[in-house]
Image (cartoon, grey):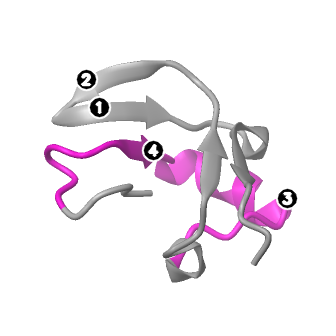
């Protein structure tokens, strides 16, 4: 999930391929339906290109936008 125009510099929340089914099973879409939404993500920020957070569980990402 890229939070800016350039993933090499802007904040990114990464979900690795092996964890994607967990998100899908929980009803968390990791697609363009997130574009323009306000999200809250939980975890540790590391540097991977730009700032990055690895998401391994769907409880780490919450839509906070009422729309």
Q: Nearer the viewer, mark 4 or mark 3?
A: 4
Is disc 4 placed on a helix, strand or loop?
strand
Cα distance, mark 4 to mark 1? 9 Å
Is disc 2 placed on a helix, strand or loop?
strand
Cα distance, mark 3 to mark 1? 26 Å
Instruction: Identify the residue at image location x=22%, y=64%.
Output: 5
46 sits left or right of 22 in the view: left
Q: Determine which quarter of the picture holds residue 4.
A: bottom left
Q: Is residue 50 above or below residue 34?
A: above
Is disc 3 placed on a helix, strand or loop?
loop
Cα distance, mark 1 to mark 2? 5 Å
C-beta proximity under 8 Å, tags 3 and 2: no
Residue 47 in percent (x, y) is at 25, 23
Mark 1 surroundings within 10 Å by alpha-carbon count, few (fewer than 14), some (14 through 19), many (20 or more):
some
Q: Which mark is residue 13?
A: 4
**What residue did someone put label 2 on?**
47
Instruction: Identify the residue at image location x=29%, y=31%.
Output: 51
Of callouts 4 and 1, which one flags the residue occurring earlier in the amino acid sequence? 4
Cα distance, mark 4 to mark 2? 11 Å
Q: Which mark is residue 51?
A: 1
Per the image, is 67 magenta? no
Q: Nearer the viewer, mark 3 or mark 1?
A: 1
Of callouts 4 and 3, which one flags the residue occurring earlier in the amino acid sequence? 4
C-beta proximity under 8 Å, tags 1 and 2: yes
Magenta range is 6-31
**What residue did someone put label 3 on?**
26
C-beta proximity under 8 Å, tags 4 and 3: no
Instruction: Identify the residue at image location x=45%, y=32%.
Output: 53
Residue 63 in percent (x, y) is at 72, 58
């Amino acid at each position: 999930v890229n939070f800016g125009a350039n993933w090499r510099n802007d904040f990114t929340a990464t979900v690795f391929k092996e964890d994607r089914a967990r998100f899908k099973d929980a009803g968390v879409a990791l697609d363009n339906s997130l574009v323009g939404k306000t999200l809250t993500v939980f975890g540790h920020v590391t540097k991977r290109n730009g700032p990055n957070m690895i998401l391994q569980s769907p409880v780490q990402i919450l839509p906070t936008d009422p729309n």
